[in-house]
Image: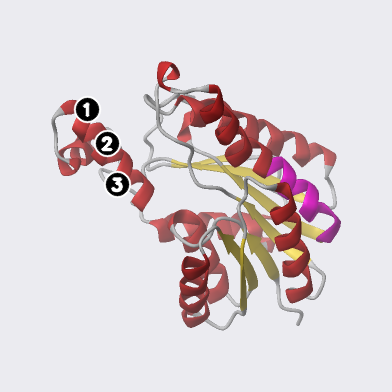
Amino acid sequence: MTRKTALVAAATSGLGFAIARHLGAEGYAVSICGRDRDRVAAAVGQIRAAGPGTVHGQVCDLRKGSEIEAWVGAASEHLDGRVDALVVNTGGPRPGFFRDLSDADWADAIDLVLMSAIRLARAAEPHLAEGSAVVFMTSSAVRQPIDNLVSSTVLRTGVGALAKTLAREWAPEIRVNHVYPGRIGTDRVRALDRGRGVALGLTADEVAARSQAGIPLGRYGDPDEFAAAVAFLLSDSASYITGATLAIDGGMLRGL
């Protein structure tokens, strides 16, 4: 049986790392990228130790199209020229309210969040096998704007629209879905809680407790829980799911 292959962007920490580790444990041949060489090497070691899959890692700044193309090209060689699964992911842009952000901040955020998704989809498409699956990751801000994260709210909404569009353009050969996390226990969320705490005169734990009080399941999600949902959408078990948007948020958002 041919081993399945996957590209997971921004996978040296947080949700990207959790997904890559989960896929590696399932036996996928995985390629990851990240901006820091040491963190890429550390993540490769941990993913390799998680299970029977193989793993390739490369330094790549997702704000730069040339580096995305170089990573996808090298990854395709590592994955024997075929990509069965693609996870379009990136780190978050600088927090801030509208009045806080300059043109330079917006330009950097556009390259990091929106253009990285466009460029990665463009670079990966020629390598995606028939029957492959793509998952775009965004944020709950696509459904409900988040205070102090205006650039993320605006740009991740655009990524969600891109996912919906490609689900039609790439069908029936390639399935494309979109997921967004609520409050998942990552370093990024902990940093946001600390920043919110400074603004409110609270500790990060107190901010987290307030957030968890509004989540029906009463807690932050675990990155491994998020990864399992993404792995399902990438699997053959989800073969009739495309164009879907899945909230992985413990019931946090109340909109219909």
Q: Reading the chain from its start, which is encountered first: label 1 or label 3?
A: 3
Q: Do the residues bearing badges 3 and 2 touch, measured as CB atoms within 8 Å?
A: no
Crowding at dot 1, Cα within 10 Å, few <14 / some 14-19 / many 20+, comes out as: few
Residue 255's x, y, as percent?
45, 24
Q: Is any part of residue 34 visible from this angle?
A: yes
Above/below status of 50 relative to 74: below
Q: Residue at x 27, y 36 (%)?
A: 195
Callout 1: SS: helix
Range drawn in magenta: 117-128
Question: In the shown orientation, is residue 25 left or right of residue 242?
Answer: left
Left or right: residue 167 versus residue 245 is right
Q: Secondary structure at mark 2?
A: helix
Q: Position of residue 79 (x, y in %)?
A: 74, 73
Q: Is residue 116 left or right of residue 38?
A: right
Residue toward you, 29 or 194: 194
Q: Is 162 placed above or below 39 here?
A: above
Query: Disc 1 versus disc 3: distance between alpha carbons?
Result: 14 Å
Q: Quadrant of the N terminus?
A: bottom right
Marks 1 & 2, CB-CB < 8 Å contact: yes
The residue under label 3 is 190
- Residue 130 among magenta residues: no
Work out whether mark 3 precedes mark 2 in sequence or the reverse, and give the earlier one. 3
- The numbered mark at residue 199 is 1
**Mark 2 highlights which residue?**
195
Task: Give the alpha-carbon distance from disc 3 to disc 2, as whole Å.
Answer: 9 Å
Q: Say which amino acid is labelled 2.
A: Gly
Residue 195 relative to residue 112: left or right: left
Q: Amino acid at mark 3?
A: Arg
Q: CA distance from mark 1 to mark 2?
A: 7 Å
Looking at the rendered structure, the secondary structure element under dot 3 is helix
